[in-house]
Image (cartoon, grey):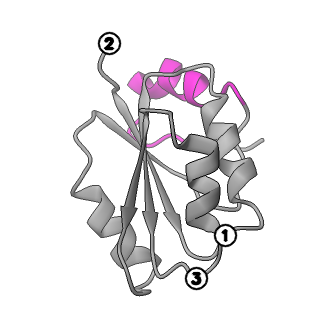
Amino acid sequence: MEPNVTILLPVHNDERWISMCLESITRQSFSHFKCIVGFNGTKDNSKEIFDTVCGNDTRFFKVDYGEKSGKSITLNSMLSLVDTEYTCLIDGDDMWHPEKLLKQIENIADFDVLGTMT
């Protein structure tokens, strides 16, 4: 089954939290997603942490945008890589409940935009 959700994760010096963030994505009960991680001028160990947590997971893609250009420019660049029906955003210091994507996918047909708060 092809993924129908793309998760966009812009990263700028998030080494303190990025491991927990990535692990929360890998633990999603809904697994038909791909995650694009866009590094934006990162100078810390975030890229190495990504490699450790997600290096062998084919759902995850690393894109290095080089010098810092800002979150909105990075997200707009990442949007050009999306080829799925749905797009989710997550920040490097966020963590998702394991059922987050599943609950949203189950309810998306009724809404244009869907968020969660847990």
Q: Disc 3 to disc 1, how far (Cα)?
A: 10 Å
Whole-percent x, y for residue 109 in the image: 39, 23
Dot 3 or dot 1, earlier in sequence: 1
Residue 46 lies in what quarter of the image?
Answer: bottom right
Going by the numbered disc 2, the residue's amino acid type is Met
Please state which of residues 21 and 86 is positioned toward the viewer in this rendering. 21
Going by the numbered disc 3, the residue's amino acid type is Lys
Say if mark 2 contacts mark 1, CB within 8 Å. Answer: no
Q: Which mark is residue 43?
A: 3
Residue 115 seen: no
Name the residue that disc number 1 marks.
14
Going by the numbered disc 1, the residue's amino acid type is Asp
Say if mark 2 contacts mark 3, CB within 8 Å. Answer: no
Q: Disc 2 to disc 3, how far (Cα)?
A: 36 Å
Task: Read off the magenta span.
Answer: 98-114
Name the residue that disc number 2 marks.
1
Q: Disc 2 to disc 1, how far (Cα)?
A: 32 Å
